[in-house]
Every structure is written in structure tokens, then in C-alpha cells.
Amino acid sequence: MLKVENLNVFYGGIHALKGVTFQVPKCKITTLIGANGAGKSTTLRAICSLVKSQVGRITFQDKNITNIPTDDIVKMGVAMVPEGRKIFPNLSVKENLDLGAFTREDKAEIARDLKWIYELFPRLKERLWQKGGTLSGGEQQMLAVARGLMSRPKLLMLDEPSLGLAPLLVKDIIEVIQKICQEGITILLVEQNAFAALKISDYAYVLETGCLVLTGSGEDLLNDAKVKKAYLGE
Amino acid sequence: MTINLLLQNIANGLSLGSLYALIAIGYTMVYGILRLINFAHGEIFMLAPYFLYFGILIFHLPWWASTIVAIGLTAFTGMLSERIAYKPLRDAPRISALISAIGVSFFLQNLAVVVFSGIPKSVHRPIFFTKIYQFGEIRIQSTLFASIGVSIIFLSLLLYIIYQTKTGLAMRAISRDIETSRLMGVGVNRAISITFAIGSALAAVGGILWSLRFPQIFPTMGMIPGLKAFIAAVVGGIGSIPGAMLGGLILGMSEILFVTFLPALSGYRDAFVFFILIIILLVKPDGILGIKVQEKV
Ligand SMILES: Nc1ncnc2c1ncn2[C@@H]1O[C@H](COP(=O)(O)OP(=O)(O)O)[C@@H](O)[C@H]1O
Ligand SMILES: [Mg+2]
């Protein structure tokens, strides 16, 4: 569904991604793990055209989306839940969700998706008119995921959704991600919290200072000696 | 001071204040989205009555039609100035865009001198706006009602757009976080253009109402009202739309009351406005309705 070929990203003089190539197959969960600063966020941001200087080729559903405007990429069905949630604190929960559906005009369908969101995240329904900034960290993460879903994406990319959450909430988020995938939405997950992510992943890649160093199924990597040592703390 | 005179001055203050409010919106909206003080906004304000004047003189349009055309042209000019002078600098340090804004201001002013000439012109006023209403002892010019009424209509329309429409939602999102707005599929360039168009259209309405009050127009006429409206935006809390409205009213009202109560000092009315600015900056640096705006990263 998504193909990234020989992707290079530069931040001024910093060569942040050095020829990254990988694929995200349809209706599966693909995970990118790596230490802080490895270039995981940069990869996702490059896919959405949020970085200035990138070389390489990114194709989504066989269409070249390299460097096309972000709003066009969103319209094609790519949504991203950014690192640090990035909820609009000055807007209500409902307005945050409406923004998620910004590219859509189908009112009836939007209403139906909202219903689904409320089933998935009952907490959000209770807080619909509260400002985004007043939610707890866990609720904000739920809202960020829900907002991403409101564009009815084909591919949902999540950048460290478990960052800073209590273990119990991490479990919730992981379950939600599985549920979303079961609805037929392809997932590209970025995590430092490798254990939980690898357990639900169909495919996984390990990123180290801008290069992909390992590839395999989630299970393969869970059992890989190097991964165990470097990312699972065993 | 009789109660009548006071009422008359309150009407005066409201009307001047609503003009400041109309102009202040443009400063505050642009600042809210780009963190840019658009120094050229006063010149945008000046262009509107000129467009009106030439619409009547050259194209023989009726006043109302020329007004509509002038508002449209002014909105377009504002939008164009952003595309040409600010958009290429969006990723540059903020001071560059600020300097560019000063450049646009000088450019438009001097262009007006060259094209329209520096000699003041007298804009046609429809008879209706020269009428004076008498309520007991209070005499109120119909332009006062017009400024207040028209301002209320346009400001309500603005609030509707900002708080009830998708475009407004996008603007509020962008003012907080441009990058995440992009991720929501918001076309940021388009939203910024709309912001400039709306701000400039409101300045145009202000400029035309201004020309009903003070029919003499000249290329530098935008400087003082522009400066005062900017102060109004700061007093109300720059970035806040209700703040700009409130700031405009406060400024217009205090200016008129200052002149009324201290007629001997009326030559200092502009200085008095700066005095208010200094007081507000000392007491409440973020303005009356201002929220602490985070620095953009
Ligand atoms: N906006 C930026 N400007 C300069 N360097 C950046 C920027 N964003 C990220 N980097 C650098 O690029 C590298 C990869 O960062 P990032 O993709 O955020 O890593 P990760 O998400 O894996 O922690 C790091 O060395 C980081 O310092
Ligand atoms: Mg990151």
C-alpha cells in the first residue's frame, strides 16, 4: 500500500535519513522501532511532506506522493497522529474531531464515523464540549487517534502513541490500534516502547541513526538477540 | 457638561471606536496566524476610499456599487500583498517579514502619491450620510449611526465566520499550530489568503466609513488611524478577535471623552492614545483579553 524507496532527509547539514527503503502492506500493522533520534518521526513526517528537503520516492497506492502538498496526501487517505499528540488546546473536543474530518464533505458519513468513534472512545463523548487542553494525557492521546480516524484514512500513521502514558493506558491504546486495523485500516506505528508494539505487529523494521538495520515479522524481532539487547532491555 | 452633551459624545466615541475595531481586526487576525504585525494595514485602509473615489469619478458607478467594488479590490490587494511580500518569507526569521511589511507600507503610500497624486481629494458622500438627526438637544450625524450599524453587521458576520464555519475553524487551528493543521488536511496557504482578504475587507469598510466622516482623502491618511487601530489591537490583546473589537471601542471612546473633558488638551489626543498603550503594557502586557501566546517553535 505504501512504498518508501531510498528516502533521504536533510535538516540543513544533518543527514537524518540515509536511504531508507521499506513497505507497508495493506490491512496490516507495520512497526518502526528505534532509539531516540534514529529518524522515526522524520520518516513519518517525510511521508506527509512535512519536511523541507527530501530525496527519494514515496508511493501510496501506486501513486507518487513524494513532496506533494500535505493536504493532498491527507485527501488521498493518509492520516498521521503526531508525536506529542498535538491536540488543539484552544478548541473543544468536538472541534478537534471536526478538524480531523476537514477534507470531507459527506455529512451523513461523518456523523456515522463520529458514532463509531464514540463507541471506540466513550470518554471522548463525555467530554465533547471541553477544551482539548483540559484533557488528561491519556484522553488527549485517544482524541489524537480519534481525530486521525475522522478523515477516514486508508493508512493511519501513529508516532509514539504510548509516549508518557501509564502502562494500563498503553495497553488500551495498543488494543485500540488492533481494533482499528481489524476495520481494514492499514497501520504504520512508530514506537520506542518496542515490546508492546512488536507483539501486535505483522511486520517490523529497526531504524538506527537514519538507516534500517533489521527487518522481519513482529515475532521474529521479538526473538532476535540484538533487538532483545538493544530495545527490550534484556 | 450636560447629560445631552455626554450622550452625544458617547455616540461619537462609539462610532469612532467601531471604526478602530474594524481596522484592528486585520492586525489581530494576521498576528494570530503569522505572528506578523502587518504595518501595511493602514495603507490598505487608505486604498479603499481611493478605489471608491475613482469608481465614481472614472467609471461613473453609483456610490453603493463603487463601495462594493472598492471593498473587493481592497481585499484583493491585501491578499496580493501577502502572496508577494510575506509568503516567500514564511520560513525566514520573523524580523524579515516585519521589515517586508514596512516596505509594503512605504510602497503603497508612495504608489498612491504617484498614481492618485498627493493632493487631497474629496470623496462624494450620498445625501443620506450628510443628514443630521435631532433628538431633543442631541444632534447626531447619520454617519454615526451608519458606522455603528455597519460595524455591528460586519463584526457579527466575522464572528460567525470564525466560530461557526469550517474556514473559521481552520483559522483558529492555524493560529495555534500550523503544522498540525496541515496534517488535518487544511490548505494553509488558502486559509492565510482568506485571512488577509477578510482583514483587508474590514479595513476597507472602515476606510469608507472614515471617508463619510472625514471626506478628505490623501495617501498618508492611513497612518494615524492604522497606528491607533494597531494600539487598539494591542490594548485588547493582539491575536484575540473579541479583544480587537473591545480595544477599538475603548480607544475610540477614551479619545473622544478625553477631548470632551479636557478640551484645552485636545491637541494631545494622539499622545493620549499612546499613553493608554503604555499603561496597558505596564499593567497587562498581554492586553485585556489577551492570552499568553506561545512562541512558535
Ligand atoms: N527540525 C529539525 N531540525 C534539525 N534537526 C532535526 C529536526 N528534527 C529532527 N532532527 C534530527 O534528526 C534526527 C532524527 O530525529 P527524529 O526523526 O525526530 O528521531 P526519532 O523520532 O527517531 O526520535 C535527530 O538527530 C534529530 O536531532
Ligand atoms: Mg520521534
Image (spheres, rainbow, N blue to C red):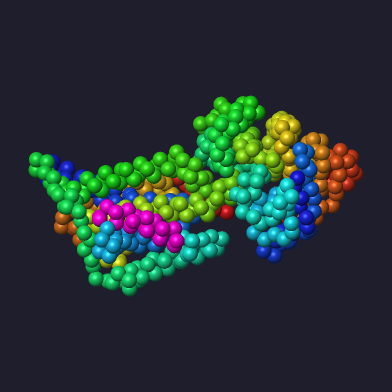
Query: Quick one: quadrant of the C terminus of chain A?
Result: top right
Residue B23 picture location, percent across and down: 34, 53
Asked whether, in this view, residue A89 is left or right of residue A66, the answer is left
Residue B217 picture location, percent across and down: 25, 63
Q: Which residues are magenta?
A: B62-81
Residue B78 lies in the magenta-colored region:
yes
Q: Residue furthest bottom?
A: B114
Q: Residue at x 56, y 26 (%)?
A: A126
Q: Residue furthest front?
A: B60
Query: Quick one: quadrant of the N terminus of chain A?
Result: top right
Up-down: is B266 above or below B152? below
Residue A112 picture location, percent across and down: 60, 29
Residue A47 picture location, percent across and down: 69, 51
Q: Residue at x 85, y 49 (%)?
A: A214
Which of the two residues, A138 or B73, is positioned nearer the viewer here?
A: B73
Q: Quadrant of residue B76?
A: bottom left
Q: Main secondary structure of the magenta part?
A: helix
